[in-house]
Image (cartoon, rainbow, N blue to C red):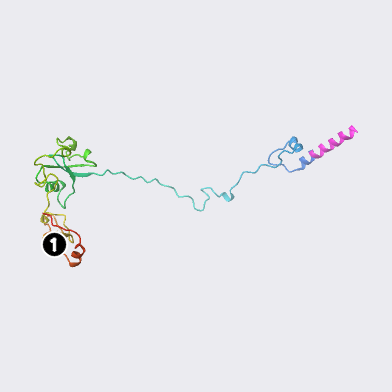
C-alpha cells in the first residue's frame, strides 16, 4: 500500500515536471513551490511600448516649438519739477513748445527765483549740476509757514502767473480758446518765431456744445 502511494506521488511529480518542461518559457522563472501552492503564475506585464515611437519629440508630427525668454528693459521715469527757492514749493513742468523747461518754469513763476530739478520723486530730484532738492535751505519750508513776498504771480503764495495767448507756444491749429469775446478757434499753430495771434470766432455747433459749460477767460 505504501509502495503504491510512493509510486503515485512519483508519477505526479514526474507529470508536473514534464508539464513544466513542455510549457513555453515565461518571462520569469517559476519554482515548484509556486506550482504546488497556487502562487501567482501569471507572467508580469511587459513594459508599455508607445506605438511607432509616439510621444518622443523626434517622432512627433509637430515637434514642440522652442520657447524663448522675453526680457524687458526697465526704464526709470524722470519728472521735471519747477521749484520756487524762497519756500521750496514745487510743481511739475514740461517744455512749452520750443521753450525749455527752465524758461517755462520762469514764465509761470516770474515773481520769484526758480530752479528746475529732475527725478522720479522730489525727494531724489537734482539739478543738471547735481544739486539735490533736499539740500536747498528752504526745502519743504512751504509746509511749515508762508513766506512774505514769496509768490509766483505777485498776488498770493499759491497762484501761478498766467501766460498770455500771444506768448503761448503750445497753441495748435484747431485749438479752442476762451477769450474776452467768447470762444475762438486758432487758425494756425505756434512756431519758434511766431505765436498764434490769428483767431476766428468758434462755429455755432461748437458754441452750442459748450453753452452749458462754465467758461471764463483767464486774466
Q: Residue at x 77, y 42 (%)?
A: 22
Crowding at dot 1, Cα within 10 Å, few <14 / some 14-19 / many 20+, comes out as few
Magenta: main secondary structure equals helix
Could you say where residue 53 lies in the image, as x and y percent from the top left? 56, 49
Please, which residue is most extreme toward the top here?
2
Could you say where residue 179 lies in the image, as x and y percent from the top left? 12, 59
Could you say where residue 2 lies in the image, as x and y percent from the top left? 89, 32
Secondary-structure class at tag 1 = strand
Q: Which residues are magenta?
A: 1-16
Could you say where residue 101 lies in the image, as x and y percent from the top left? 16, 47
Please, which residue is most extreme toward the right here?
1
The quadrant in which the N terminus is found is: top right
Please, which residue is most extreme toward the bottom here?
204
Tell me: residue 52, above or below residue 177. above
Q: Is residue 48 left or right of residue 34?
A: left
Q: Which residue is mark 1?
A: 182
Please tell me whether residue 15 belongs to the stretch shown in magenta: yes
Please tell me whether residue 13 belongs to the stretch shown in magenta: yes
Amino acid at each position: 500500500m505504501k509502495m503504491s502511494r510512493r509510486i503515485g506521488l512519483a508519477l505526479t511529480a514526474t507529470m508536473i515536471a514534464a508539464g513544466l518542461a513542455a510549457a513555453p518559457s515565461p518571462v520569469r522563472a517559476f519554482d515548484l513551490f509556486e506550482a504546488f501552492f497556487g502562487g501567482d503564475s501569471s507572467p508580469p506585464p511587459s513594459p508599455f511600448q508607445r506605438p511607432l515611437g509616439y510621444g518622443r519629440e523626434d517622432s512627433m508630427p509637430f515637434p514642440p516649438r522652442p520657447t524663448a525668454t522675453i526680457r524687458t528693459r526697465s526704464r526709470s521715469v524722470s519728472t521735471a519739477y519747477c521749484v520756487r527757492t524762497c519756500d521750496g514749493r514745487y510743481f511739475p513742468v514740461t517744455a512749452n513748445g520750443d521753450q525749455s523747461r527752465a524758461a517755462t518754469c520762469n514764465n509761470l513763476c516770474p515773481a520769484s527765483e526758480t530752479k528746475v530739478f529732475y527725478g522720479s520723486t522730489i525727494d531724489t530730484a537734482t539739478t543738471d549740476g547735481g544739486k539735490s532738492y533736499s539740500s536747498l535751505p528752504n526745502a519743504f519750508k512751504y509746509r511749515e509757514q508762508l513766506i512774505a513776498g514769496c509768490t509766483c504771480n505777485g498776488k498770493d503764495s499759491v497762484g501761478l502767473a498766467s501766460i498770455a495767448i500771444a506768448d503761448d507756444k503750445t497753441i495748435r491749429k484747431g485749438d479752442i480758446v476762451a477769450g474776452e469775446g467768447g470762444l475762438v478757434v486758432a487758425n494756425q499753430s505756434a512756431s519758434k518765431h511766431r505765436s498764434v495771434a490769428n483767431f476766428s470766432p468758434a462755429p455755432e455747433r461748437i458754441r452750442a456744445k459748450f453753452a452749458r459749460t462754465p467758461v471764463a477767460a483767464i486774466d
